[in-house]
Image (spheres, grey):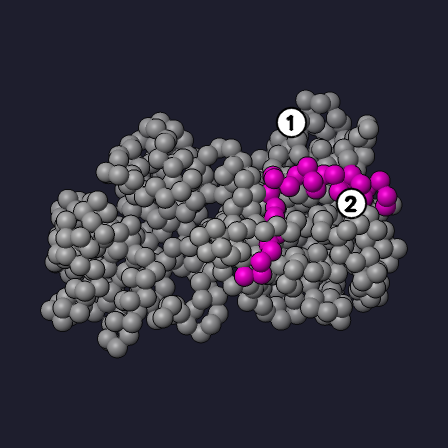
């Protein structure tokens, strides 16, 4: 059997499959559909210090092979999530990644410190790339200087590995990626959703209250794959690729362009046991292509 | 909650744009309660991507019945399926109408809103007095009358806006009189938002337990994506999929 394990440098995962933040709830919602232990790791829905209601409805608009969302990081706040994580930590051995949000740099650091102190939490993912919080989709990951400052600050408050989640909506994602690396990021994850616009023709208005929303799903895969490929060639730290992954073949494509692991998101909404199928497909595809380990093909795209 | 491959065993067209599907889903059918819904993958392709929510009309293990109106792409794809086709179905999902033993209940269904109430009527009509108030734009929107007529309902009132079936008018126009005559202990309603908002206004001053089943656009159907929220009376958002679809009527903030 092929070796599915992946090395992130600071830790080894038994396979590259990581459900993406915002698409896997707080983990236990998926336990009726799978043994959470089959996952390489899992990322919880993004969390702020305080509870947040999220954006007004409508929050979703389906597009061809994709969906636009404007959820706005609704969530219970850090206190409640700590209790959830204690339960989840007792229920699975899979590494838990907390997706950290903040309204300002100080809140990012404060929330990161709270969860870095929890023994159940393996690592943090810094969500500097959500397009649905501020009007116009503005986020720290659109600016390399802000990214550097923020990553540096958060790293000073934690003693756990930090993954920095990047936005495809940055003018120069490679510059942002380099800034995150120079500031001490242990890994990068990319990409978050692409800014998109949905129009209500009858009302002659945008569908969403925030005008713009985040596009995800298979429709974005070629765009995301290109950004992952570009960033992987320009940074030394591991990259976790994501965007439109729905199959074992998709996973191999991301590894081939240089990703160390992958996150898969939207597919979890349509198929709650997607991880089980994707894992089986990955093994089968590796066997068919006579790939003995993921390390063997990582970054080996011939251009 | 199961993710089950269901086999279509019967398809029935009920006039223009309305369909009934009988699907063999033993695991889901066994667990389903009146008011639950399912998420159905209407196509094996990635477009459309999301499953679609459908209320369970009736659970008759190993079968569930779906009743739907063709409104868009998802329902068009669903109605094109044939007997023997398989569908990925996630369910049963959501909560359900409460058991209110011995109480007299007024069931209020606007058009497709009959779906969650049909199963309730079928399972409860023999045990307690149920009064049905069912309305639509015309006879073309009112189906299942024969099946409803076969149930031991205490009383039925049918309304159509054009007078083609039952009394002419909006069902809400008959509500006051029916409540005065029947004196129900509780109401359970499902239908268009405008109808539900009108009910909320009319029932506000009445001392009854009132429940409503809501529809919403859903991404996942099991509480993860947070897309199907409605605004509650306290201003907070509630998820229709896993906090509902059944809510106490007064817990929802209705448009004025």
Q: Residue at x 23, y 53 (%)?
A: B136
> Most extreme residue toward the front, as rendered?
A204
Q: Judge depth for marks 2 and 1 and give the one in front.
A: 2
A226 part of magenta stretch: yes
Element type where label 2 sits in the image: strand
Q: Is residue A43 visible?
A: yes
Cα–Cα gap, marks 2 and 1? 24 Å
**Which span is picked out in magenta?**
A209-235
Question: Which element carries disc 1, helix, strand or loop?
Answer: helix
Given the image, what chain letter belongs to the residue carrying mark 1?
Answer: A
Residue at 43 percent across and 69 percent down: it is: B232
| Residue A89 in view, yes or no | no
Nearer-N-terminus badge (2/1): 2
Mark 1 neighbour class, 10 Å CA radius: few under 14, some 14 to 19, many 20 or more: some
Pick the residue in front: A93 or A169.
A169
Residue A230 magenta: yes
**Residue shown at 37%/46% (left/top)?**
B54
**In this rendering, would B195 be left or right of A256?**
left
State the residue at coordinates (30%, 56%). B191
Q: Chain of mark 2?
A: A
Residue B131 image point, x, y percent: 16, 60
**Residue named by callout 1:** A284
* Number of on-image labels: 2
Name the mark on residue A239. Answer: 2
Residue B70: x and y in percent read 34, 41
């Amino acid at each position: 059997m092929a070796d599915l394990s992946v090395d992130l440098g600071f830790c080894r995962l038994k396979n590259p499959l990581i459900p993406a933040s915002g698409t896997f709830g707080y983990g236990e919602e998926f336990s009726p559909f799978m043994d959470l232990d089959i996952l390489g790791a899992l990322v919880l829905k993004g969390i702020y210090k305080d509870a947040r209601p999220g954006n007004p409805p409508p929050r979703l608009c389906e597009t061809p092979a994709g969906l636009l969302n404007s959820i706005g990081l609704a969530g219970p706040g850090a206190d409640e999530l700590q209790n959830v994580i204690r339960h989840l930590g007792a229920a699975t051995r899979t590494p838990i990644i907390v997706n950290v949000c903040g309204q300002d740099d100080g809140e990012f650091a404060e929330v990161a410190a709270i969860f870095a102190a929890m023994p159940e939490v393996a690592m943090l993912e810094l969500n500097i790339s959500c397009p649905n919080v501020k009007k116009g989709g503005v986020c720290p990951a659109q600016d390399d200087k802000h990214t550097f400052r923020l990553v540096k600050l958060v790293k000073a408050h934690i003693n756990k590995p930090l993954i920095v989640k990047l936005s495809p909506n940055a003018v120069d994602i490679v510059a942002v990626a380099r800034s995150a690396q120079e500031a001490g990021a242990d890994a990068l994850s990319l990409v978050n959703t692409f800014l998109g616009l949905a129009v209500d023709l009858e009302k002659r208005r945008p569908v969403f209250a925030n005008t713009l929303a985040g596009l995800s799903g298979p429709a974005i895969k070629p765009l995301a794959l290109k950004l992952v490929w570009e960033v992987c060639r320009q940074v030394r730290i591991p990259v976790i690729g994501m965007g439109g992954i729905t199959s074992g073949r998709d996973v191999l494509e991301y590894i081939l362009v240089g990703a160390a692991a992958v996150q898969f998101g939207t597919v979890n909404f349509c198929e709650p046991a997607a991880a089980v199928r994707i894992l089986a497909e990955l093994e089968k595809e590796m066997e068919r292509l006579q790939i003995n380990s993921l390390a063997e093909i990582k970054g080996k795209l011939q251009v | 909650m199961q993710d089950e491959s269901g086999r279509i065993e019967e398809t029935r067209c009920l006039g223009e744009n309305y369909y009934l599907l009988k699907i063999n889903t033993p695991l889901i059918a066994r667990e389903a309660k009146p008011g639950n819904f399912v998420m159905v993958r209407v196509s094996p392709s990635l477009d459309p991507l999301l499953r679609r929510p459908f209320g369970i009309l009736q659970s008759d293990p190993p079968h569930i019945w779906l009743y739907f109106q063709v409104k868009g792409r998802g329902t068009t794809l669903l109605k094109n399926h044939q007997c023997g086709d398989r569908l990925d179905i996630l369910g049963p999902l959501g909560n359900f109408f409460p058991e209110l033993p011995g109480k007299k209940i007024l069931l209020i269904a606007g058009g497709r809103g009959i779906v969650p109430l049909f199963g309730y009527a079928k399972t409860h009509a023999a045990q307690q007095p149920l009064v049905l108030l069912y309305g639509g734009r015309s006879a073309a929107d009112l189906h299942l009358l024969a099946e409803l007529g076969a149930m031991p309902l205490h009383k039925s009132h049918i309304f159509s806006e054009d007078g083609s079936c039952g009394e002419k008018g909006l069902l809400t126009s008959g509500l006051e009189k029916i409540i005065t005559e029947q004196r129900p202990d509780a109401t359970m309603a499902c239908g268009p938002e405008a109808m539900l908002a009108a009910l909320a206004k009319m029932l506000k001053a009445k001392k009854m337990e009132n429940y409503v089943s809501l529809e919403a656009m859903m991404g996942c159907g099991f509480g993860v994506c947070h897309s199907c929220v409605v605004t509650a009376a306290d201003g907070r958002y509630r998820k229709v999929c896993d906090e509902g679809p059944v809510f106490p009527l007064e817990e929802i903030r209705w448009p004025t």
